[in-house]
Amino acid sequence: MNKGLLYALLAALAWGITPMLEKTALKKIEPLQAVFLRSLAITTALWLTFCFKHSYRKIFAADHVSVVLIIAGGLLAGLLGQLFYFTALKSWDPSRVVTIAGSYPLIAFILSVLLLGEQITIYKLAGVLLIVGGILLLRI
């Protein structure tokens, strides 16, 4: 099996299981607390991993523009996106929240065409139509 495919499937499995855990937890905890606890757990695990692998030295060698862009992405997706996601998940069906929130490839496609000059292909357009169709079906 292709290594990329294997990791993509493992990511899908992890991301498919996680909303069930989070929906259950959000019955007794607020979204901001959930984002904090999740981020704390991730940060702790990353610090331990970096310390054991001695990878922390590489962080300080990264170029400044890349650092700023990664931090901005983390704040946008990791903080705001998670907060919005948990707030939606607390009050709505996980299957609907995940599908709507998971439509980010549509937004990424549109922005990559507009801002990065990515080429539009028939396969990409078909994917966009499937995403939009899935969102419309779940709204029913």
Image: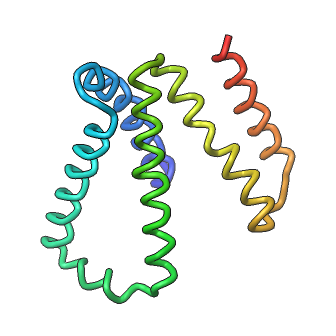
Q: Position of residue 84 (x, y in %)?
A: 47, 38
Q: In the rendering, at what x and y percent does residue 91 appear?
A: 43, 19
**Left or right: 104, with 67 as reference point:** right
Which residue appears at 31% of the width and 43% of the height?
35
Identify which residue is drawn at 47% across, 52% down.
Answer: 77
- 140 relative to 83 in the view: left or right: right
Looking at the picture, does residue 67 appear above or below residue 70? below
Task: Residue at 30% x, 25% y: name it.
Answer: 26
- Measured along the vertical axis of the image, is residue 64 above or below residue 112? below
90 and 110: which is toward the camera: 90
Give the percent coordinates (x, y) of residue 134.
Answer: 68, 24
Q: Which coloring applies here?
A: rainbow
Q: Image quadrant of residue 59?
A: bottom left
Q: Is residue 64 left or right of residue 99?
A: left
How many numbered marks appear?
A: 0
Q: Position of residue 49 (x, y in %)?
A: 19, 65
Left/right placement of residue 85 relative to residue 105 reads left
Q: Quadrant of the C terminus?
A: top right
The residue located at (86%, 45%) in the rendering is: 122
Q: Nearer the viewer, residue 120 or 42?
A: 42
Most distant residue in the top direction: 140
The image quadrant that residue 129 belongs to is top right
Q: Is residue 58 depicted above or below 75 in this figure?
A: below
